[in-house]
Image: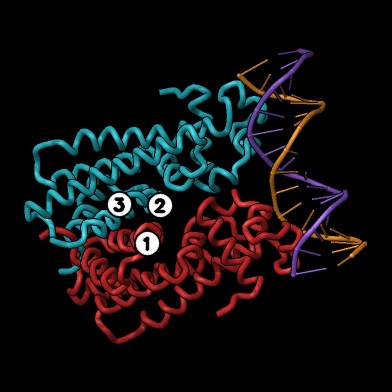
Chain colours: A red, B cyan, C purple, D orange
Amino acid sequence: MKPNRKEEIILTAAQLFKEKGYSAVSMRDLAQELGIKAASLYNHIHSKQEILASIIMQVANRFTLHMEEVSPQPIPAIQKLEEIIRMHIDLTIQKTDFLACMNNDWMHLGEENKGNYIEMRIDYETKFREILQEGIAAKELEESDPEIMLFSILSTLRTLYLWYAKNKNINPDVLKTDLTKTLLQGIIV
Amino acid sequence: MKPNRKEEIILTAAQLFKEKGYSAVSMRDLAQELGIKAASLYNHIHSKQEILASIIMQVANRFTLHMEEVSPQPIPAIQKLEEIIRMHIDLTIQKTDFLACMNNDWMHLGEENKGNYIEMRIDYETKFREILQEGIAAKELEESDPEIMLFSILSTLRTLYLWYAKNKNINPDVLKTDLTKTLLQGIIV
DNA sequence: GTCTATAGCGTGATAGAC
DNA sequence: GTCTATCACGCTATAGAC
């Protein structure tokens, strides 16, 4: 899997954006990291904005597609949640920098993409909420405020990349098992 | 409680930093929001950096102080966790913008403050980890990976400000009860 | 595909009038 | 305490040589 120059630029950009944020990374910083001059970047990409959009929309699409696949399945809510947790873990491992960038810098998307991104995010949360409500209705889940469940689980999954950066050697299957247990069953004996 | 001009500047800055990030907010943006010119800001503050440090170190100190108060108490670990959750909720409500800023922009602190902030953050996590380990040893908590418990709870508490921004009318006591239940007992029946 | 040079504008911060 | 004017520099992006 040899990335071409454009992909290489986007990968490096994601890494820098994760560390300092989109606005604090200049085209000169990015070029230097790649060992070229800033002007040379423009033979591969059209603008700084395009790089950001490429990073964010790429992972946003993968979340959307996976949710559209899991959501309508005729399986128990708990099983759907396990599927979703597994996907967040996998994407966190595969696309750590992209995820960080999506979480922190989506507000710097251009007007063409921002609306789209926000819509995808709302749809994702809506489908997630519906799964929780299914689970409550089926008495699989506690009859507690689904908004708080949603927020609590999703905030953990969304910032998993922060924790993963410091624990890169963990076995993904162990992480999946332990995190699922913690999120679904809590920590009290 | 009438804030003087310096406090007013810092409050407004925190608000803007929360929305766009430190680097994306200019002194001209900040001045405009206050109805003055950028140059006038410098009669009240020394630099943009000073504003950021003031915002972040202020809340970081409050977290540190509270943890130093709760941590050594001779009470069960679960009770300490409830105390900590309560404090995060209270600070989230009182200092929403400051917390957002601390979470997102600490890496833009000047060299004088960054090391200090990171140290406080590590100390906080260490004391939190010790409470979890106490709980496990006392068989109050599940014998599960304390790193995953720590990350899971703390990531929810740290991003609570995002959720609170959309649910400002919730009763803090209800939030405390429901969130504690979700974090400690999970969501499964 | 990378370079140098540069346009055009925005940035944080200062000096000094009022 | 706020203003206008300005400095010195950094920014994204383009033009055109090689």
Placement of the C terminus of chain B among the 4 image quadrants: bottom left
The x and y percentages for residue B167 are: 37, 52
The x and y percentages for residue B76 are: 9, 45
Q: How many C-alpha atoms fall within 10 Å of the one at disc 1: few (<14), some, or many (≥20)? A: some
Pointer 2 with pointer 1, Cβ within 8 A? no
Quarter occupied by residue A107: bottom right
Q: Which residue is mark 1?
A: A164
Q: How many C-alpha atoms fall within 10 Å of the one at disc 2: few (<14), some, or many (≥20)? A: some
The x and y percentages for residue B28 are: 65, 36
Q: Which residue is mark 2?
A: B162
- Callouts 3 and 2 in the same chain: yes
Q: Which residue is mark 3?
A: B154
- Dot 3: chain letter: B
- Dot 2: chain letter: B
Q: Is residue C15 left or right of residue A147?
A: right
- Dot 1: chain letter: A
In this view, A32 is above or below B114 = below
The x and y percentages for residue A173 are: 29, 74
Q: Nearer the viewer, mark 2 or mark 1?
A: 1
Amino acid type at circle 2 is: Leu
